Amino acid sequence: MSRLSRHSRSLSARLRDALRRRPERAAAVLLVAAVGGLVLFLAVDLFPYHSVNDDEGVYLYQAAMLLEGRLFLRPGAIPTDAVRPWFFVVSEVGGETAMYGKYSPVAPAMFAVGRLLGDWNYALGLVAAGNAAGVYYLAAAAFDRRVGLVAVVALAASPLFLLTSATFLSYAPATALNLAFAVAYVRAARTDDYRWAVASGVAIGLAFFARPFTAVLFALPFIGHTLAVLWTGVRAGEDAVDPAFRRVLGRAVAVAVPGALGVGVALAYNAVVTGDPLLFPYAAFAPNDGIGFGPHEILGYERDYTVALAVETSAFVLEYFLTEWTPAGVVGSVLAAVGLGVAAWRRRASLSRYRPSLSGMTDGEVAAVVAGVFPAVFLGETYFWGTHNGLRNGLIDLLGPFYHFDALLPVSVFAAAGAVGIVRAVRDRLADRTTRRRARVAVAVLLLVAAPVVVTAERDALDRPFAENRQRTESLDATYDPFVERAADAPDGTAFEDALVFTPDTYGDWQAHPFQYLRSDPGFDGDVVYATDGSPERDMAVLTATNRTPYRFTYRGDWTAAFRPVTPEIQRLRVLSGASVDATTTVGAPANAESVSVRVETTEGYARYRVPASARENETVTVRWRVTPDGARATNLAFASGSDGAAVPLPDGASEVDLVATFVGQGGASVTYRQEATVDAGDDRIRVVWPPETRICRLTTECGNEGTWVGSDGSYVSGVTVETAATAANRSA
């Protein structure tokens, strides 16, 4: 123990000594850690239920799969359409239905690290810190360490960096890999250490696996630099025998080989999941989605992506990026332009006779490749229609032009160079006219005067996107409130145990879209399985296949991508089974109602019933109705018209029985109660899912979630109430 204590004290002493000798490095460590902490805070505070970009759920699903050693989801007997997550591809593997994610597993693997550490969000903080460290190193390599420190601050002041880094999307992780490639590339060039070159190749290979097109665009300036250095050696008459040229060639090979292996791994993954090494999962999901001009389509949205549209989109995004998503908006962009000018001015004498160095990478070369990332990203992304699609669906308005996330590197570096260059120029000018001490004091005063301007610009840049995302988070908070309440009331903090929860089909048959916070375990064997509400046949099949306690999650209101809140509810369901099911529904008479009619409907017909005035006791109407394998009917009201016989017949198998009560008031205004019960008719038994879905529709007899009955919490016409109960005769367990 004493040896361990001495070793700890010695290590602490060395660390303190290093911090004293290299305070700027210590400041860099603290800044990088602070950036990671800031992004972690935003992920927890601003996006506790994730953003409205439902791709986050895809990455987290895949991350959970990797933690369980899975590349595929296998629903087994559960109908696939009921549990297919958003952006998952359905295929057949080994003779059974399987599903795989649209995206590469690289970013999910990075997110999985957070889960291993105790919380998914930790991964976001680590990735953000890694990006900050990469920007610091490259800025210091291109200029100096003070510029590196300011570059980290500039990066952290970018709304695009903060918002996109705080979400489980692949853009920040891919940039982290790209920056790792760049850092290792520069280190390899400056140290002639092949280990750094190999690390650079591994990083860019992984980046290609994560986001192929993004990695290629980022690497282009570095590829250009490598080719320029090699060409310089060739023109100088060097050959493979010359040590300097041989080292340069060796470094290039050391980068290229593992980079190519990364490409090979990506193609091997394609072969495993799609069956074709050249078919990427995103292309398997939507063959007409991707790079290139011409017709494109994804999920029913089609557009001919012409060159003119590409130029128009890119010009808009360039302006949008530079004015709203950079550090302090326009201020950061102007400083970046100044920094670019500073870099060019410092090297103005050597520009006309510049030749890449064979003996290392100069700061000017680092600055050049960093600057080259900006046009590579913006010109390259012009070839990709995704930016246009992101503008159309509004996601870029909320999270920024995330396809151009890599462009934050040159903007942050050169904005820092511009800011530091201005300060130094002012200080030197003043120092020529007075003492250096007075010059430093004057610069400090000028910085204090300028600070409110910069802070105001930064506040303006952050205000709109943060406010709009906060608004959506508040709406999501209201949406998921029943789940949070259930978890809070449970002794172990678990909202459900051995449960099946049906979720609304807001966007069709997609799980976790839009409710990406609600995700089943990859093996469909956790505390809860989420299934999208569907047809009676499918719902009954899900109930049979899962054999769990069923619930229904529903809401009242129009779903507006969380722009406005909805009123949610979770209902405990029962499956009543017997020779017959007898139900009682009592509804309140809306204000000013003058008449009421009742109908029982199935796909085979309907029956209308008369409601005598005496039945409207206490301003309510009670309907007793029975469902048997032979049909459904009201038992306490007189038959008026419709299907012949005593009951409205049911089709064989699963179907729906609707009880409809319509109140009509003065001027024809109407309020309709519609209860939709899922039933399954056998030869001598009936199964009914209870309670039925209940909607209250104004001026129409059918409506969607805007009319959902969620109890007294909803907003309804005065007088509206619903009470319902049911029992089964000879009900089985």
Image (spheres, grey):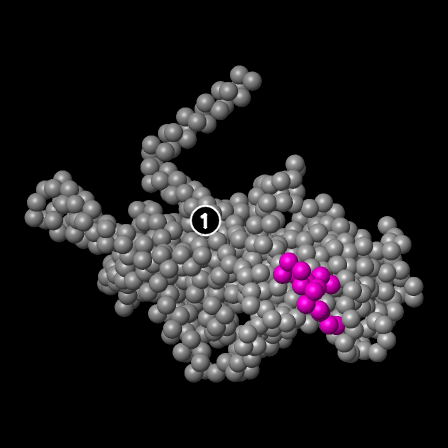
Q: Nearer the viewer, residue 371 or 280?
A: 280
Task: Report x, y in % for residue 644.
Answer: 84, 78
Image location of residue 384, percent across then percent down: 50, 73
Residue at left offset 51%, top offset 59%: 565
Instruction: Report whether 589 appears left or right of 370.
Output: right
Q: Residue furthest right?
A: 683
Q: Residues within 10 Å of mark 1 (few under 14, many from 20)?
A: some
Q: Nearer the viewer, residue 281 or 503?
A: 503
Above or below, 285 against 342 in this view is: below
Residue 604 sits in quarter: bottom right
Quarter of the image that includes the N terminus = top right
Which residues are the magenta region? 609-623
| Visible residue check, residue 45 | yes
The amino acid type found where label 1 is placed reads Leu
Any part of residue 270 in sight: no
Residue at image point 71% right, 69% down: 611
Residue underneath mark 1 = 42
